[in-house]
Structures are given as C-alpha cells and as structure tokens.
Image (cartoon, helix red, strand yellow):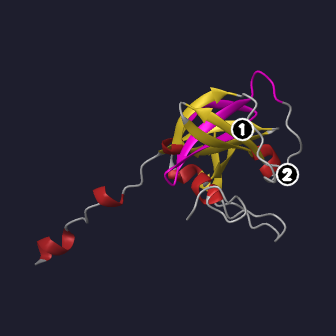
Amino acid sequence: MYAEMTKSPQRASTTVRPREYLTFRLGEEEYGIDILKVQEIRGYEQPTRIANAPAFIKGVVNLRGVIVPIIDLRLKFGLGEAEYTTFTVVIILNVGGRVIGMVVDSVSDVLELDPSTVRDAPEMSAIVDSSYILGLGTMNDRMLILVDIEKLLMSPEMAIVGA
C-alpha cells in the first residue's frame, strides 16, 4: 500500500504545450493569432464593396471560386484609416467552417509561445471590448496582443461567422 501512495501521478496528459502564433502589425502594436486558423497569406487587392456593410467590412474577393468577406482589423479595432501599401496583406482564415480574409498592416513571423509567457489581459473599462483578447504574450523584448480570432469573428457585431 505504501508503494501505491508514493507513485508520482501521470503528468503527460496535463502537460500544456507551447502554441504557435502568426504575428502581425496594426499600427505600432503587434498581435498574434493561432496559426492553426490561418489558411494562407496574400497580398492586398481591392475587394468588391458590399452595400450597407459596416465600414470594417471592406467587401469580398473571389478566391479560387470561393467568395471571401474581407475585414479590416484596423477599422474594427478603431485604429483609424489604414494606408494600403505593398506591405499590407490579407490573412486568409478558416474559422467556424467559413473562409474569411483579414487585412493587416504587415505580417511579422510565426512564434512559439510557452503558456508561462502569456499573461491575462488587464481588465478594461466597459468602453473597450477585451473579451476576444486571450492575453499578452512576451518574448524577449516583444509584447504580443493574443487575439481569439474565432471569438472575435463569431461575435454578434461581426455577423460574419455564425455560432
């Protein structure tokens, strides 16, 4: 009986592994999203505008026969009008069974973050909706705002991906 009590518990199933995030810039800030949601990265092309769509929905593009809504995260986050340059890219995401394009200023790289380097997002006022922020990741001197892109795109005000 003593031998049974001294056995260490199995930890293999509870080990939290590092996760990979695609990092991108919006203005001066760097963000990260789960790399598993990313389908591809493309250069920015002017989408076809849709009447009565919110300003952050830039329109749609035809991606190999699939009509893809394009959202501009700079506008969605209230960061002002974007200047579309040669560095502007569209991250094509597969979220909730839908393909969606997300315009960002530039893509940085893919980082692997250990869960121990991710801190909870600070509590914000009711004016700032931080419900889609997973936390703040740190690596060396970089700080990433980690976005739960599925939660953001499935939110009622986005009305792009159904729950």
Q: Quadrant of residue 4?
A: bottom left
Q: Nearer the viewer, residue 58 or 135?
A: 58
Q: On screen, 11 above or below 63?
A: below
Q: Which residue is mark 1?
A: 103
Q: Quadrant of residue 31?
A: top right
Q: Give the label on residue 78, or none.
A: 2
Q: Is residue 116 left or right of residue 25?
A: left
Label 1: state its secondary structure: strand
Amino acid at circle 2: Gly
Question: The magenta stretch spans which residues?
Answer: 84-110
Q: Give the label on residue 22, or none.
A: none
Q: Nearer the viewer, residue 33 or 119?
A: 33
Please tell me which of labels 1 and 2 falls first in the chain.
2
Residue 99 is inside the magenta segment: yes
Amino acid at circle 1: Val
Residue at the (59%, 30%) spot, across then down: 41
| Distance (Cα) linking label 1 and label 2 | 14 Å
